[in-house]
Amino acid sequence: MSARRSLIGPGEAWAVITALSYTTVNVLLRAAAVEIDPWLGSMLRQVPVALLAWGALLWVDRSAIQPSSPRFLGWGVLGALVLSGFISFVLGNVLFFGALATGGLGVAAAGAQGAVVVAGALGGYLLHERPSRRAWAGITMVVVGLYFIATAQGAPGGAWLLGLLFAVGAGASYAVSNLVTRTVQRRRAALWVTLAANCLGGLGVLLVIQLVRGGGNPVAGADAGQLGIVLLAGCVNALALIGIAQSLRHISVAASSSIQTATVIFSFLAAILVFGEYATWPMVVGVTAVAGGILVANLRRREVATPPAAGS
């Protein structure tokens, strides 16, 4: 198979789809976050993803969870994926709901995308995918941009600062989960078993928590309208998670996370157009720096060959 030079490959395309999907999710969750309980919201957001993942797994790749099959990933790998789901869908999503409710869409989006630093560093040292100097320059620009975006939200205060801390914690959780997903995808393409195991660690734990909190009713006291908004966000979130998994089949965590940082730009545009937020000069500087960092980090692509569809 001959090598070819590609500026935008399937990994980059899936990462862009992920960014657009997460922007839509952010807008929907922002509309509901003030009213809905973060634990309930995190659980409902996960339902469409779990139905899709487990339905597809049982339909097309059931052997991946059968110990007698040569395609079985192993209990250790499955356990790691379940833990990854807990970190992302329980810790990460609950923190992100808190960030949206206390800090707003701008603070939540900027803080969570700070995970690009964590993903790039951990991906480089743990997965031996060291970013190039050009990539590090782009990541540095992204960090500077995120700083300006964060400070543009207003003077530090109780709720604002708490929201920013929640967002950073959520972003770090997502970054760790992405690293585990990347490790599994490097061994064998296993999209549906990856998502299904993640959902087991996420939705399964959240369901138990809500059953205990609601006295046997996991949606006790919930408003029907808010439930509908969060469930719709969950449907879009399913597309975003597929985008992440597919992206990580072709490109590194650092590259995928850098592209997904465009969610910050899209979210701020949505914040202005949908929620009436103002575009102050620090925000404009920050968005420009983030966009430039994404471009620099992904401007030069190495020669690649189309990867084999292993396990598909």
Image: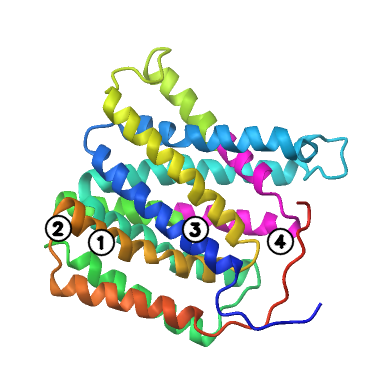
The mark found on residue 175 in the picture is 3
Q: Residues within 10 Å of mark 4 (few under 14, many from 20)?
A: some
Tell me if label 2 and label 3 are in contact, CB under 8 Å: no
Q: Is residue 129 left or right of residue 145?
A: right
- Examine the structure image and report whether residue 195 is included in the region drawn in magenta: yes
Where disc 2 sits, the SS reads loop
Q: CA distance from mark 3 to mark 1?
A: 21 Å
Nearest to the eye among marks 2 and 4: give it: 2
Q: CA distance from mark 1 to mark 2?
A: 8 Å
Where residue 132 appears, x then y in whole percent? 55, 84
Tell me if label 1 and label 2 are in contact, CB under 8 Å: yes
Residue hosting label 2? 277
The mark found on residue 186 in the picture is 4
Residue hosting label 1? 268
Q: Is residue 64 visible?
A: yes
Tell me the magenta residue range.
173-200
Residue 56 vs residue 41, the one in the foreground: 56
- Examine the structure image and report whether residue 85 is included in the region drawn in magenta: no
Q: Residue at x 52, y 40 (%)?
A: 86
Q: Residues within 10 Å of mark 3 (few under 14, many from 20)?
A: many
Q: Residue at x 69, y 54 (%)?
A: 184
Q: Residue at x 49, y 83 (%)?
A: 299
- In the image, residue 194 above or below residue 108: above
Q: CA distance from mark 2 to mark 3?
A: 28 Å
Nearest to the eye among marks 1 and 4: give it: 1
Q: CA distance from mark 2 to mark 4?
A: 41 Å
Decide which of tag 3 and tag 1 comes sooner along the chain.
3
Q: Is residue 308 left or right of residue 70?
A: left
Residue 144 vs residue 69, the one in the foreground: 69
